[in-house]
Image (spheres, rainbow, N blue to C red):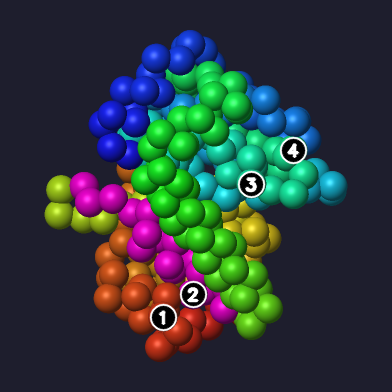
Amino acid sequence: MESAAVDYLINFPKQAFDKNDFIVRQGQAVEYIYFLAEGCCIRNIFTIKGDEIIYDERIANNSAYCLLGALTLYTPIIIHETNFIAKTNCICHKIYYKDFLEFLSLYPSVLHELLQMALSSYQNINANFHAKQKGQAPCRVCSFLLENAKLSGENYILDKHFSISEIARYLGMHRITVSKIILALCDEGCCTHAEKGLLLQNRETLQLYASGDEKLNYLKR
């Protein structure tokens, strides 16, 4: 977001959240929008069966992704369908929803960022859905590894906080499926487990699996 928009938002009252606190809770009517100024949180949902699905992770970086719950204002029923849960200690600025709508009228460029964010989320969810329908689970797992691994020295590493269960929740897959795929990737020399996390040894081959140009045989694991 432009600096003037950020300066406007930080004038609203601060609220601190401890790690694992709910910032926004699913099923809750929208009264406030939260601007994430410090820390990191995740957006997730708990299904009727009690399963957790993680949609994304939000980091305080002054982008539209820091406007927690903003898109709910544009849904037919203005009730949060997802949670925002603090992954670290967080500081947010709490904005009454009518004040937030006034803010958007003053800074319409933020609306464009929110639209881009909504479509990006839709594309990710759509890709996960089609992967499950077409049996393309390895494509989505490999894409996830490539998208989330960070350069550490000369190597790309997926941080160890992305456990098998965590990856499964992000992709809406069964953890056993994810486990078999990563085991197959390790056997193929694409990845290996290291102290800091999962080391991507062969990103070129991972990219071929991610694009579907190569097929990974994992079902017999």
Disc 4 marks which amino acid? Answer: Ile
Mark nearer the N terminus (1 vs 2): 2
Disc 3 marks which amino acid? Answer: Tyr
Are the residues at dot 1 and dot 4 in contact (C-beta closer than 8 Å)? no
Are the residues at dot 1 and dot 2 in contact (C-beta closer than 8 Å)? yes
Q: Residues within 10 Å of mark 1 (few under 14, many from 20)?
A: some
Magenta stretch: includes residue 59: no
Q: Is residue 77 left or right of residue 152?
A: right
Report the residue at 57% width, 50% height from top. 55
Report the residue at 38% width, 19% height from top. 10
Q: Give the quarter of the figure containing the C terminus.
A: bottom right
For the residues labelled 1 and 2, the Cα–Cα distance comes to: 6 Å
Which numbered circle lies on residue 79?
Answer: 4
Q: Which-is-in-front pick, marks 3 and 2?
A: 3
For the residues labelled 3 and 4, the Cα–Cα distance comes to: 10 Å
| Image: magenta residue range | 136-152
Residue for badge 3: 74
For the residues labelled 1 and 4, the Cα–Cα distance comes to: 37 Å
**Which SS class for mark 4?**
loop
**Which SS class for mark 3?**
helix
